[in-house]
Amino acid sequence: MKIATQLLHSIPVDELTGAISVPIYQTSTFVQESPGINKGFEFSRANNPTRKVLENLICSLEEGHAGFAFASGMAAIDAVMKLLKTGDEIMAVEDTYGGIFQMFQHMFERFGIKANFVDTSNTDKVLAAITPNTKMIWLESPTNPTLRISDIKSISKIAKQHNILLVVDNTLCTPLLQQPMPLGADIIIHSATKYLAGHTDVIAGLVVVNSKSLADQLRFNQNISGSILSPFEAWLTIRGIETLSLRLDKQCSNAMAIATWLAAHPAVDKVFYPGLSTHKNHHIARKQQKQYGALVSFSLKNDNIKNAIRVVNATKLFKLAESFGGVKSMLDHPTTMTHRNIPEEFRKKSGLPDSCIRLSVGIEDAEDLINDLKQALDKLNLPAGKQMTVLQ
Ligand SMILES: *Cc1c(COP(=O)(O)O)cnc(C)c1O
């Protein structure tokens, strides 16, 4: 089965009733026939039939051994971090998701697990940064918002040689655009809040692991820490995934049209989109991704916070909001919003311009979206000769 079919048909019909939509098993416990004799379910923190459908679905899409659903992407990451112990070190992609940066620096550091942030888009730097205590390499590819790409296959070879677990946060791609496990990843993370659920109405996290031993540890962490996804949120996420293929195709083609248009706009300095041949890591993205995703970031020639804020305040279709991945287009100014807790030194090191604007491209008509950006950029009052349409 191709993945677009799998999205729908890895979701079983309910055996008990024939319901074609997965039933929401809203129950905390399950009646047992005799102690230990039951239908495979005892208590919903440990296992729940609705959640299990989602866990099996993501496992099958990512070609893993087992899947787990958590109350959020951060809860999923927390459970994976608890595979480590005091004294272990983690090597993480330099421009990691803001929440992950804070979790590693301000939470796990206190428990003696040190995070080392490295530019993993350069595989040589990964090799050079390994220490005898490195137990995990943490990749996001592409990163957000500057969409840097790391070569998952080459890094997985290095990780295997050094007996290091390779974790890939696949939130930006979903298994439809990129499958890290066949490329050598051991653990995959998703914030299902983004593209998988896809309608900006749920917070959810998923983990897929590639072995029984990792599955046993993760199952223990999930049950003991208890940060599970509720049956209703699991159902919403399943329903979202059913239309992922349609949504993402449209979002990726809209994103490509917008990135191409932005690259030719006189007020725009850099466009960050791995689908453009000018992108530094375009060749790796082409090799390991099926399409280039639906996040597009850009900076302004007049690179300052004030100008970026003028633009993000002026769009009408692109709603100003944190998060991404939904059907409705949104935009964000990372420096003052999603990435404001990242120290300036790290922001600069990872090449995030002050005026960077991140677009989460939705499924609207591409021309309408471009016109919305055009009227917002027009508000910047370009120098004479480059004036565009009259201000509204
Ligand atoms: C949003 C996000 C997370 C965190 O997920 P939540 O569902 O918000 O807890 C982790 N990684 C990436 C790449 C994200 O975009």
Image (spheres, rainbow, N blue to C red):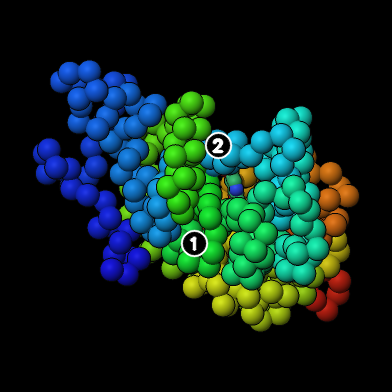
Q: Is mark 1 within 8 Å of ligand 1?
A: no
The residue labelled by disc 1 is 181
Whether residue 387 is situated above or below residue 89 in the rendered picture: below
Q: Residue at x 67, y 59 (%)?
A: 162
Q: Say the numbered circle drawn on residue 79.
A: 2
Q: Is residue 9 visible?
A: yes
Which quadrant of the structure image shows residue 243?
bottom left
Whether residue 237 is situated above or below residue 33 in the rendered picture: below
Q: Residue at x 83, y 67 (%)?
A: 301
Describe the element under mark 1 as helix, strand or loop: loop
Camera-side residue: 248 or 28? 28
Whether residue 330 is situated above or below residue 231 in the rendered picture: below
Numbered marks: total = 2
Name the quarter showing ligand 1.
top right
Relative image position of residue 161 (x, y in whole percent): 65, 63
Relative image position of residue 265 (x, y in whole percent): 72, 74
